[in-house]
Image (tube, helix red, strand yellow):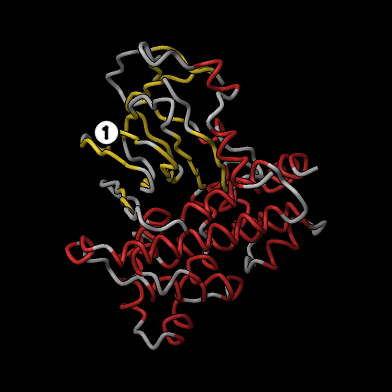
Amino acid sequence: MNATLLEKQLKIMNSFEQKYSGTPEKPNSFSTLIGSELVLSPQNEVPDVVPTEYFFKPEQNVVFLKHPRYIKFSTHSHSFIEMNYVLSGTCKQMINGKEVMLKEGDLCLLDTNVTHAIDQAGENDIVINIMIRTSYFDSALLRRLSGNDLLTDFFVNTIYKHKEDSRYIIFSKHSTSKLRELILQALLEYSNPQLCSKEAINSYMLLIFTELVRIYHDSPHNIDQPVMKKGIISEILDYMEKNYDTLTLDKTAEYFHFHPNHLTRLLKTNLNKTFIDLSHQLKIKNACTMLENTDLTVDQIANKTGYTNITFFYKTFKKFHGVTPAKYRKENQRLNQ
């Protein structure tokens, strides 16, 4: 299948639309999930929180979907990042209580926990939803985006900082077909997986992010929206991930020519985390990788990730994942089989 055929296919009612959609005159209204089913609820006073597992399989980090037509989705939020790209027509949303109208060629990047409602899409309103787990943005990807202050700032704050405000960014560029091309090619790989499709999708995502930065910097509105410089933060995170098993505050501060107190303040201000918090986060993340993909004993993994006190490793691991390392291994190795 090529991009032209894919566009034609997107205009056909899919199985989800056939099951849940209303009509152009009487669209359905959904706001609540019970199990795996959408529940009709024209009015919903409390925003619904959409669970991540409704869209993502355990092994998935990125999901592409066509937004269903003839359905009104009342106010909801979720703990993953969402991008809405308007392939044709329009898309009207209420984001944080403000009406936002997206036109053909526009893309809206939504932070985690943003409350938004989506008005019904008509027959010619084709919107591609791209949903991304926050864990997808590891330090390696952030480093590759480090020259792009806009997205680095957005993703660093999304992943590491517990914040009261949730943000969104609108990218408007109707004259270019490059973003459209990249999204369609990524959607093709997702819809028709082949050899190395996962790697291809990752490559397309990086190209999509790069194109978004170019679009944003070419737009006049960016002058009035200064973005904090986060390049040094991504560099620090990258250093910490590469050296997670031998990390110390003094060594890290020395590497970046900072006083330890300055590094501590920098991390706390920008990420709302202490050096120790981040250090344990990286150690446990790498421990999970070893539990999923090696036959090393739990004690060996603890030592390899920099824990000399095995009891403390167990306690820290359970704090992050709610289960013991052995139970985590059993559950996740089964999922990957």
Q: Quadrant of residue 127?
A: top left
Nearer to the camera, 75 or 243? 75
Q: What residue type is labelled 1?
A: Met
Q: In which quarter of the image is residue 212?
A: bottom left
Q: Is residue 207 left or right of residue 86?
A: right
Q: Where is 172 relative to 143, above or below?
A: above
**What element does badge 1 sit on?**
strand
Q: Which x, y percent locates residue 138?
A: 53, 61
Q: Which x, y percent locates residue 185?
A: 59, 52
Residue holding disc 1: 94
* Residue 38 in view: yes
Q: Which x, y percent locates residue 307?
A: 63, 65
* Residue 111 in view: no
Q: In this view, does 263 lie to the left or right of 298?
A: left
Nearer to the camera, 318 or 232? 232
Residue occupying image coordinates x 21% and y 60%? 221
- Looking at the rendered image, the quarter that the N terminus falls into is top right
Q: Where is 210 relative to 331, above or below?
A: below
